């Protein structure tokens, strides 16, 4: 039993990060033969990509994927801890699994991901959901074969959660959801410690992958026919700062662009580390997509300071304008939190002011959710929930207005779209423009995986329709 410890997870040392290769003992290779698995993923792209690794490891153990959770022999929830509602959704699902386990006692059930790194969660599992077979965290996905083996040979919940800074495991197997676009981790963890955020605790210290490992992965994806890579990190602009190396994010972007893979994307950019050189490189290479996710969180300097974001409204707006000047067709999206402890109407108006100035292409908006163990969870918060809900509503109305306006500029224009999957709408394929706009295109299935010129014929707030020209 290795239980999570948030206090331990908070520590940061100068210790060198261990880079090791994935290894799996032959004795695990038959464990899953004849059995099926179902992995349910919550949370961000990083979790989505972790699930791609988890699925591949399970397949190396002999398991086969089953789309029907209720009929699967192994069910694993890869969880997210970012807000209370993510947490509640997972516990709702654990409740469902309990019933399933009563009907089919032979199934194996487990929980992994960011929630597994939280003491409160594991305590609740041990108190109320003893039927679960295993729990592991974000730092030992590569040990899944051994964890499963132990879980299958024990009659109580096997807990194996490491609260360490983390290693880097290269060559971990991966079963990608798409044949055309791929997630590529460039760094793990986060050292920013924004006061509201649980990620630095659940994902450990910032660890950048070596540039050559990333480039090799991108080249091999290109050789396999992938059209698009998205470079992943909580804070990609800080890439390389933890390495004793002479390269940074702008160098990495340039090297990835030079592989000539058709589309390069990256998320998420923290406004703090966004350098001029990065903007220049984005503007210089046509295969770096003109799409930037630039989380604002709040427009009030007072709240930004309490959040520990280390930029001001003015410096954010300056950066925004610089990006728009050098990459004029860039679409820029953001994240905003309303109702941070102590947020006044005046603070909120500052946020609305930034939205009015930036006229974002789109925004993810959230009500502040206190996360146990973070500094903001202890701050005095006397704004009633009803007021926070009103603010969120007002903000969303404004965000939606600008999202529609941004889309309206595309009407009758011709834009490149990577056709990725069959659309919910019959006879159509869905894909994204270079600027990350979702388009439903009338096209036959054979066109999947192609980047085509599409004329936009209709626009809505969250999607567009188009025809191939
Ligand atoms: N690394 C990214 C954010 C990842 S979390 C960045 O720094 O921008 C995604 C978003 O969830 C954040 O941008 C923030 O808007 C929101 N979020 C994080 N913690 C939250 C909390 N405790 N309550 C509400 N929203 C939160
Ligand atoms: Fe969380 Fe801030 Fe790190 Fe983003 S940069 S993951 S918001 S601590
Ligand atoms: Fe959630 Fe963990 Fe991602 S908390 S947002 S899954 S890093």
Image (tube, rainbow, N blue to C red):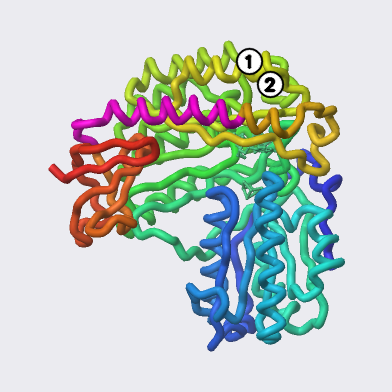
Measuring from the top left, give residue 193's x and y in whole percent.
Answer: 73, 34
Q: Position of residue 84 (x, y in %)?
A: 71, 47
* Magenta residues, start to end: 392-415
Q: Quadrant of residue 230?
A: top left
Res 414 quadrant in image: top left
37 or 187, which is in the foreground?
A: 37
Q: CA distance from mark 2 to mark 1?
A: 7 Å
In the rendered structure, the answer to whether residue 336 lies left or right of residue 83 reads left
Residue 241 place in picture, x, y as percent: 62, 33
Residue 242 seen in the figure: yes
Left or right of 10: which side holds 87?
left
Q: Is residue 292 above or below residue 198?
A: above
Q: Residues at badges 2 and 1 in contact (C-beta under 8 Å)?
A: yes
Q: How busy is the neighbourhood of tag 1: few (under 14 within 10 Å), some, or many (20 plus)?
A: many
How would you classify the magenta stretch by its main secondary structure? helix
Report which residue position mark 2 lands on.
304
| Residue 56, label in figure | none
Query: What's the residue at 86%, 45% (across, down)?
Result: 7
Left or right: residue 213 compared with residue 181: right
Image point (70%, 32%), residue name: 386
Ranked by sequence position, the earlier of labels 2 and 1 is: 2
Mark carried by residue 312: 1
- Could you say whether the residue bearing mark 1 is in a helix, strand or loop? loop
Q: Is residue 203 above or below residue 27?
A: above
Q: Is residue 237 magenta?
A: no
Of residue 196 and residue 98, the one placed in the foreground of this image is: 98
């Amino acid at each position: 039993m290795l239980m999570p410890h948030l206090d331990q997870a908070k520590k940061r040392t100068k210790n060198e990060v261990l880079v090791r290769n994935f290894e799996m003992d032959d004795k695990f290779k038959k464990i899953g033969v004849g059995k099926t698995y179902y992995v349910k993923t919550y949370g961000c792209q990083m979790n989505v990509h972790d699930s791609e690794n988890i699925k591949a490891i399970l397949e190396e153990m002999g398991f086969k994927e089953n789309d029907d959770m209720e009929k699967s022999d192994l069910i694993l929830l890869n969880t997210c801890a970012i807000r209370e509602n993510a947490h509640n959704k997972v516990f709702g699902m654990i409740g469902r699994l309990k019933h399933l386990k009563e009907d089919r006692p032979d199934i194996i059930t487990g929980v992994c991901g960011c929630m597994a790194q939280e003491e409160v969660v594991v305590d609740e599992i041990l108190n109320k959901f003893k039927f679960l077979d295993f729990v592991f965290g974000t730092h030992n996905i590569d040990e899944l074969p051994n964890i499963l083996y132990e879980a299958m040979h024990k009659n109580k919940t096997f807990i194996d959660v490491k609260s360490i800074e983390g290693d880097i495991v290269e060559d971990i197997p991966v079963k990608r959801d798409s044949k055309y676009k791929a997630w590529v981790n460039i760094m793990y963890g986060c050292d920013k410690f924004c006061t509201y955020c649980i990620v630095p605790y659940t994902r450990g210290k910032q660890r950048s992958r070596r540039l050559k490992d990333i480039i090799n992965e991108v080249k091999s994806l290109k050789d396999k026919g992938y059209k698009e890579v998205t470079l992943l990190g909580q804070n990609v602009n800080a890439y390389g700062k933890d390495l004793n190396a002479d390269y940074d994010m702008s160098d990495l972007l340039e090297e990835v662009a030079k592989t000539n893979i058709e589309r390069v994307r990256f998320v998420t950019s923290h406004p703090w580390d966004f350098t001029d050189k990065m903007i220049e490189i984005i503007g210089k290479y046509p295969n770096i997509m003109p799409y930037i996710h630039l989380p604002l969180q709040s427009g009030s300097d007072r709240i930004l300071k309490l959040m520990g974001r280390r930029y001001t409204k003015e410096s954010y707006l300056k950066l925004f304008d610089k990006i728009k000047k050098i990459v004029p067709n860039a679409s820029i999206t953001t994240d905003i939190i309303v109702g941070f402890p102590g947020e006044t109407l005046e603070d909120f108006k500052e946020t609305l002011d930034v939205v009015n100035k930036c006229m974002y292409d789109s925004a993810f908006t959230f009500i502040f959710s206190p996360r146990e163990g973070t500094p903001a969870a202890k701050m005095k918060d006397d704004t009633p929930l009803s007021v926070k809900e009103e603010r969120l509503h007002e903000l969303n109305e404004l965000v939606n207005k600008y999202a529609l306006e941004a889309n309206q500029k595309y009407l009758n224009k011709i834009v490149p779209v990577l056709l990725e999957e069959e659309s919910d709408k019959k006879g159509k394929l869905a894909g994204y423009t270079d600027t990350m706009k979702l388009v439903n295109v009338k096209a036959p299935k054979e066109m999947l995986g192609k980047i085509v010129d599409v004329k936009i014929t209709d626009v809505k707030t969250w999607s567009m329709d188009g025809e191939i020209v």
